Image (spheres, coloured by chain):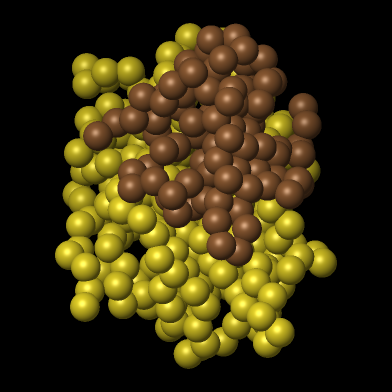
Amino acid sequence: MARAAVPGRLAGRLSWQSARLVEHRDETPTARTLVLEVLDWPGHLAGQHVDIRLTADDGYQAVRSYSLAAASDHHRIEVTVQRVPDGEVSPYLVDVFSLGDTVEVRGPLGGWFVWRPTERAPVLLVAGGAGIVPLMAMVRARSAAGSRVPFRLTYSVRTPQEGYYEEELHRLQHGETGVDVTYIFTRSTPKGFARPPGRIGIRDLETPNRSPDGQPICFVCGPTGFVELVAGTLVTMGYDPGRVKTERFGPSGG
Amino acid sequence: MTENHQDGNALAGPLQEIFAVDITAAIGRCVSCGLAGPVATLRVYHRAPGLVARCPGCGEVVLRLVRSTHCAWLDLTGTVSLQIPL
């Protein structure tokens, strides 16, 4: 019997559940979004993650944590997996895992790096590479809830070919959505792009959303070095350290 | 800047096997330096027989978790207290 569904559940001990692949989309040549159907999924908040467990024929198990990419949607969850060369889990999920196949999942996990649609403060999102995933979930949760809170997304990627969710971000960039999207390219830029390639700096962060509803809340996600640089810069700029939330990608082993 | 650690967000799954509430949003206080902050901001080293979480202020170990097939060992010697939002 399914337990009672509590959207955005933050409590309760976990159990592993079966998840079936019902759709996939390639984001880049090395990253794929997986849409999984999980019959007993209790709902989640943007920013939470899910553990995925693979079991080999000999019983060997490997677990990896992935950020949830989409807003809560009944039985469906999405993750975007970047293939890590020589990884144990990601090459399977990106290249082999096929429609109808199953894995085990547990979640949702994490209650700190989350954004709730009831929040009123403006939001600054700063993503480095694959760190876009939980921040995209926040953008999508904002749309799903019809929230009018101003969002600013600054997305740093090495090259134009490596950005995830390109069409969706393009639509946000050019629509009256209340979500500002700015790209930073660190190695090469598209033709005619004004900002030269280079690491994110104070100038890329100096146009925060201020509003009567309070100081912005910042979510920063990316590799450790990126997160430390951005979080440190934001605090130097006067942001309240208690309102700069960070999530680092460590070497999870892929 | 070292790249060999994750942060306390990575403890969410392993700790939620044990606790009935999410512990990563709890405020922990370090025995060594007294710094208080969310468990999510700890530095987590996982290339070990278990998970080792260190204080972002002083680097001392505040939490260790080792999971075997049948049980979990949780060492909180380095933690004064956990203030858990309910």
Please say if B28 is above or below A117: above
Chain B color in figure: brown
Q: Residue at x 33, y 44 (%)?
A: B21
- Farthest-out residue, right: A86
Please say if B15 is above or below A101: above
Q: Residue at x 44, y 69 (%)?
A: A16
- Residue B60: image quadrant is top right
Please say if B62 is above or below A7: above
| Nearer-the-camera pick, A168 or B71 | B71
Task: State whether residue A105 appears in this view.
Answer: yes
In the image, A204: left or right of A176? Answer: right
Please say if B52 is above or below A205: below
User: Judging from the image, what is the letter of the chain drawn in yellow?
Assistant: A
| Nearer-the-camera pick, A173 or A1 | A1
Task: State whether residue A235 appears in this view.
Answer: no
Give the x, y percent position of residue A10: 31, 47
Give the x, y percent position of residue B45: 70, 39
In the image, A92: left or right of A220? Answer: right
